[in-house]
Image (cartoon, coloured by chain):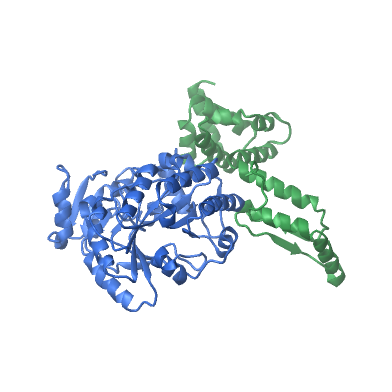
Chain colours: A blue, B green
Amino acid sequence: MRFELDAVYVEEEMRATALARRVIAALPPGVPIRHVPDGRIAARADRAAADPFAAGKRRMVIMRRRSRFLTGCPAASNEFACCGYLVMELASNCPMDCGYCFLQEFVADNPGFQVYANYADAFAELDRVRAGADRPLRIGTGELADSLAFDSLTGMSRDLVRYFAGRDDLTLELKTKTDEIENLLEIDSRGRTLVSWTLSPERVFRSSEHRTAPPAARIAAARRVLEAGYRVGFHLDPIIACDGAERDYSALLDEVFAAVPTARIEFISLGGLRMTPGLRAAARRRFPRDPMLLGEEVLAPDGRYRAFAPLRMRLYEAINRRIAREKSGARVYLCMENAAIYRRVLGAAPPAPAALGAALADGKRRDG
Amino acid sequence: MSAPADEAAIREWAAARRLPAPYLARWLELGPEDRAALLETAVGLRMRAGQLIAAFDLMEEISVRDARPVAAILARAEVRRILDGSGSGPGRAAALLGALRAIRFPRLARATERITCEIAALGLPRGIRIAPPRELASGEIRIELAAHGSEDLRGLLDALSRRAAELARIADLVAGVGWNDDEI
């Protein structure tokens, strides 16, 4: 196991679940297990800790999810081009610790690493949603958590991949910065699971992406899952416009295209670093020595700090040119950018969220 | 200045200017050379607390990014020129903040300067204001016309239309197009 835990809290009513049993059986010796009546309390921030958010990451809470599992992407907004992504919230927070991560603000009050033991209920919920859907759906588990971190403990990916393997109108996206793919390699996904890696250049990884797998390991893992019948995609997000960024991102793409058969990459999404003032303050407080948090970001009209517009545009265009040169056919889309920037970078208006979502769910096979 | 004397002087300055306690604490946490250099600057430029806070934040960020101490930032030629120059304290304090911003945001400073120069070179009549977005935060440029009557308006529109090509180039620059590699 790559990640360390200080303790595991199990909600009383969940202690007999398969997930709780699997986690407890796989825990290394010495990790205390505590049973609690309400996991929500165990997940709350420990204000006495020097860094409550970091402390929360080391405290796994196996609990029942009390609200819906399926939600719209928290990044979706009428302001932005949107990929029509549906989020399946099976966990909250992440054992890795990226300096720029939005969870530092988003789950600041309840940073315990929550894993929902009643996750099978999500399948029933999804069955109801697909019954009323008129398009293929792409559902991801990697928005409020990394999809594969701790998969060696939870084994959730096996159940997920099996569920989606039987449903041709759905695509599961597992988004990760790990190389924890062993469970995936044992299962036939029937092409219904796409594994995507968020990638950054080595310099950003070293400076900001604490406890994640190195970019080269992520790329190697992508190749392995591709060979095992999974679809793959990449997220260059956040793109950090530090000095030399054009060269760094181009080199990163060289590495991807050298390792992964380019014709089989489903998509590459691009998203510039954006931080609300609250996130920026939290991130800088936690990582005051990280130069990646000290770029030329200014307060943009959407209320987020972003690299000033000409710099951001130049970088997007340079990256898009590098991708286009490869003629891979990978779909490129922008995340959380407005229509004007989308049009300028990609040369066309952003598709409607439903259309892009359906296209990403369908993948290359049906694109022809 | 010895460390204890230096600390007393910093505390005195902070008390007189009502510098918030967290900034005083951060100031005192700096190394001896850094805090003395900052004190010399604050006193020499007769800075207000708000100016010191802005300068301090910028210098800390530059210091982390460039791995250089605060004293080294204040010793840079473009900063030294302001500190050693003539003029009023408040004027030099404002100039210092401008210089620190340019060091902290070098590509933004270059881009802003180029766009400002290009706009000035248009020589447009009074009544036309070309307004790039503040800090180039968006790719949107605004053109404001202030006319008194139709004749005045026609004159402004004619002036704009004569400069249409140059204006289009400026709009492209604001949107991120047309930059040379070494500019941003």
Q: Is residue A10 visible?
A: yes
| Residue A309 horizontal side relative to residue A331, left or right | right
| Residue farthest top in this picture | B2
What residue is rendered at 43% in x and 54% in y?
A235
Q: Nearer the viewer, residue B55 or B16?
A: B55
In the displayed structure, does residue B68 sit left or right of residue A155? right
Residue A11 in view, yes or no: no
- Image quadrant where one finds the C terminus of chain A: bottom left
Name the foreground residue: A169 vs B148. Answer: A169
- Vertical side of A84 occupied by A313: above or below: above
User: Residue A130: percent from the left, percent from the top?
Assistant: 32, 75
Query: Quarter of the image holding residue A285?
Result: top left
Residue A361 vs residue A149: left or right? Answer: right
Find residue B110 and report its horizontal and vertical position in percent.
Answer: 66, 43
Task: Pick out the residue farthest to the left.
Answer: A16
Nearest to the observer: residue A178 or residue A331 = A331
Q: Residue A88 location in percent, x, y?
A: 32, 64
Residue A250: where, in percent of width, then height? 51, 45
Question: To which quarter of the image does residue A156 belong?
Answer: bottom left
The image shows residue A47, relative to residue A193, as above or below, that is: above
Q: Quadrant of the N terminus of chain A?
A: top left
